[in-house]
Amino acid sequence: MNINATLLAQTIMFALFVWFCMKFVWPPIMAALEQRKKQIADGLADAERAKHDLELAAKRSAEILREAKEKAGEIIVNAEKRDSEIIEAAKAKAKIEGERILAGAKAEIDQEVFRAKEQLRTQVSAIALAGASKILGREIDAKAHNDLLDKLVAEI
């Protein structure tokens, strides 16, 4: 065998092998590579989108947390304000109730003083009658001298 014929046969076989690979092997490999390239690009884009969404979510959660703290502060301020209003209202109500009780007690004291004065007047008039009867040496009729007793009681 001749080296030229072998070389020529190998060249033809290599050309047929290259043609076969280019026709039947290369397109599926390239399609798979393109598909894999597209999947990787989509995955990277999704990862970038997810990173961006995560940043937005972190900003939004920080904003919501800040708003919640502000709202909690407002609620606390309103609760303290309402607390002081309730305390002031209770103090005012207690003061009014105390004044009412005090007025009632004063009225009761005034009535007791009036009753005591009346009782004293009655006792003084009885003592005066007893004294007058002893002085006059006779019994004074209370019914007959009612006007005199009323004047005496009024003076006392």
Image: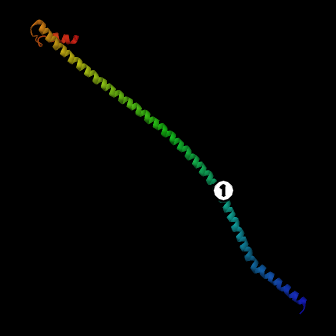
Q: Residue furthest top?
A: 136
Q: Residue furthest left?
A: 138
Q: Quadrant of the N terminus?
A: bottom right
116 and 149: which is toward the camera: 116
Q: Position of residue 4 (x, y in %)?
A: 90, 88
Q: Residue at x 28, y 23 (%)?
A: 109
Residue 69 higher or lower than 5, as above or below: above
Q: Residue at x 46, y 37 (%)?
A: 83
Please indicate whether residue 86 sits to the left or right of residue 114 in the image. Answer: right
Q: Residue furthest bottom?
A: 1
Please indicate whether residue 98 sits to the left or right of residue 82 in the image. Answer: left
12 and 86: which is toward the camera: 86
Q: Quadrant of the C terminus?
A: top left
Residue 65 higher or lower than 91, as above or below: below
Q: Position of residue 45 (x, y in %)?
A: 68, 62
Q: Residue at x 22, y 12 (%)?
A: 154
Which secondary structure, mark 1? Answer: helix
Color style of the picture: rainbow
Q: Position of residue 55 (x, y in %)?
A: 65, 54
Amino acid found under the numbered disc labelled 1: His
Residue 40 higher or lower than 62, as above or below: below
Q: Residue at x 72, y 68 (%)?
A: 37
Residue of label 1: 52
